[in-house]
Amino acid sequence: MLRSRTAAITQRLAAYCGIAIALLVTLFPVYWIASNSFKYDIDIFAVPPEWYPVNPTLKHYRAAFIERPFLQYALNSLIIAVSTTAVSVVLGTLAGYALARFQYPGRWRHQISFWILSTRMMPPIVTIIPLYLAFNHLNMLNTKMAVVIAYTAFNLPFATWMMKSYFRDLPVELEEAAMVDGDTRFGAFLRVALPLARPGLAATSIFCLIISWNEFLLALILTLTDRSQTLPIGIAGRVTQYHTYWGEISAAGFFACIPIMIFAFIVQKHLVRGLSFGAVKG
Amino acid sequence: MTRALPTPTTSHHARGSGLEQWVERHLRILMLAPAMIVLLALTIFPSAYMLIAAVTRISPNPDLPWEFAGYQNFARLLTDQQFHIGLRNTLVFTVAAVTIEFLLGLGLALLLDRYVRKLNLLKTLLMLPMMLPPVAVAITWKLIYEPQFGVLNEIMFNLGLPPQAWAGDARLAMLSVIIADVWQWTPFMFLLMLAGLASLPIEPYEAAAIDGASAWRQFRDLTLPFLKPVIAIALLLRIMDALRLFDLVFILTGGGPADRTKTLSLYIYQVAYRFADQSYAAAISLFVLFATVAFSTWFIRRMRLAD
């Protein structure tokens, strides 16, 4: 009896050690980039490394956001993310509701759902060449609009599937009751289903914001000037073949992470559903 | 299955103007149409373009007409060494990274599910990496791997091991990319597994405990089968993402050294924008697209994931 209790305690201790290591490995890189963004160059290059900024400085933030156009990049990122989200969530909510509630002849409902999902499976590199040429032809390269259109192609399938999953969780009786009371079908959607799906709407929007804020490849190809380049592109631009501006990219990189950390905290309850396109409910 | 509402016809509650009635009657089309039209425009056009481009020879001079090239661009796939390297790198990366992420994620989920009661804060901290911008992740690991002053070599030094060039070393570059990816995406596996574990029924475990089944038997015969749908979805999503890896290698290694980390996405990018060979880029893209769709369709059927 005593021996099995010792074994249980040892096991528990081992488990806690494992979790502590996982936590350390997870958080250290984030801490490290944050810490380096507040160090002078000479301290970034110090051997052995300086484990925390002994002489903290905002020098690199000033360099990035005042001397270089990172504020503009951040603003571009924000405008692009918000516009993409607005378009994707509005269209995705309508389509998601239709796919959750209406009957279509044959197996069309199933097939349309699957087709929408399959558009998301396309690797971005596959669609980017034609989009690049189309935007070039329309004189839309280096515009935020082009990036928003390209991002919508990737966010809309996601928003549709997410909203479909949230609408399916709502009891259909409430909408039926509204219609018995004389509301139209669309009115039942607008006044009954939509308010009930608000948490889902919020979670879907935040996910779209995160996806757009983080995206790299499409923006890399569609934008070349400060007017439309996003934060990730700006950061990558400071990693050149000859020199890497460690301080600046650490500052801008950590800055790019801050809104994401806040968002991640807000959507944590919906995270699993968002990550699995609504397939797994967390 | 949820119950679907009957399609509204001209029933007693459809009042109002003619327009309103028309909207009501066609509501199921009208609500679906905007998203469908946008998606069709954004996928059919690129797909059609790719198909045409792949069977032609596009001159870099936009004024010259396209020449029909038949299957020539696809025939090149068979002999192009760079393409084979890209394909092999992509497969090696996908298999290694996704396997490690899955095992670590499952292990961590089992630990937390069993030993930690107040999960919320811990979960929020552990999931952080996967939400961060891949570019920020790439520069963070670039900083950690830096051969001269990087923190990883400092740790190696303290352990009495020789310093390495990591992402700059042909032997270690792929490993370095995999480690960074594992760091970012293990939380994804972990979270999905944890959600799966939380939804397990209790009764079978009580019965198994009465029968005296060992912890391993319970895991193999109960936990794994119950988790199968979640595992399948998690693997599918991660594999599809891993197959298109771009951001991390673009910044961390640029595909080098000696092409050891050149993925297919990176190669297509180089062919299209550095070599300006759109036809061939289209042919490779189509190959990637068909391979991805074929794999995911097979996987979805196999795992009975549809709907």
Image (cartoon, grey):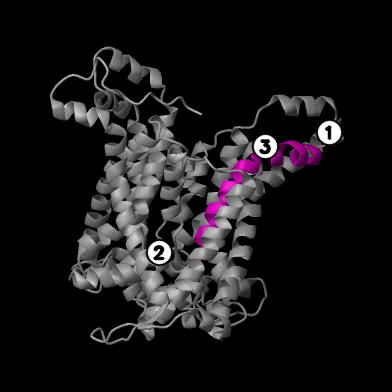
Q: Around disc 2, counting alpha carbons within 10 Å, would you say few (fewer than 14), some (14 to 19), or many (20 or more)?
A: many
Task: Mark yes or no: residue A93 visible.
Answer: yes
Residue found at x 46% / y 44%:
A111
Kindly indicate whether the residue at mark 1 contacts the one at mark 2 (C-beta within 8 angstroms): no
The picture quadrant where one finds residue A249 is bottom left
Check the residue under mark 2 and report the chain it is in: A
Q: Is residue A196 magenta?
A: no
Q: Which residue is mark 1?
A: B213
Please state if B292 lies on the left or on the right of A193 as rendered: right
For the residue marked with disc 3, what is the amino acid?
Phe
SS label for mark 2? helix
Name the one closer to the observer, A124 or B199: A124
Q: Which residue is mark 3?
A: B226
Please state if B156 lies on the left or on the right of A91 as rendered: right
Check the residue under mark 1 and report the chain it is in: B
Name the one closer to the observer, A25 or B36: B36
For the residue marked with disc 1, what is the amino acid?
Ala
Residue found at x 47% / y 38%:
A107
Residue found at x 22% / y 20%:
B14
The picture quadrant where one finds residue A171 is top left
- Residue B180: percent from left, percent from top: 53, 65
Query: Separation of disc 3 and disc 2 at Cα?
Result: 34 Å
Query: Relative to B236, is B287 above or below?
Result: below
Q: Which residues are magenta?
A: B216-243
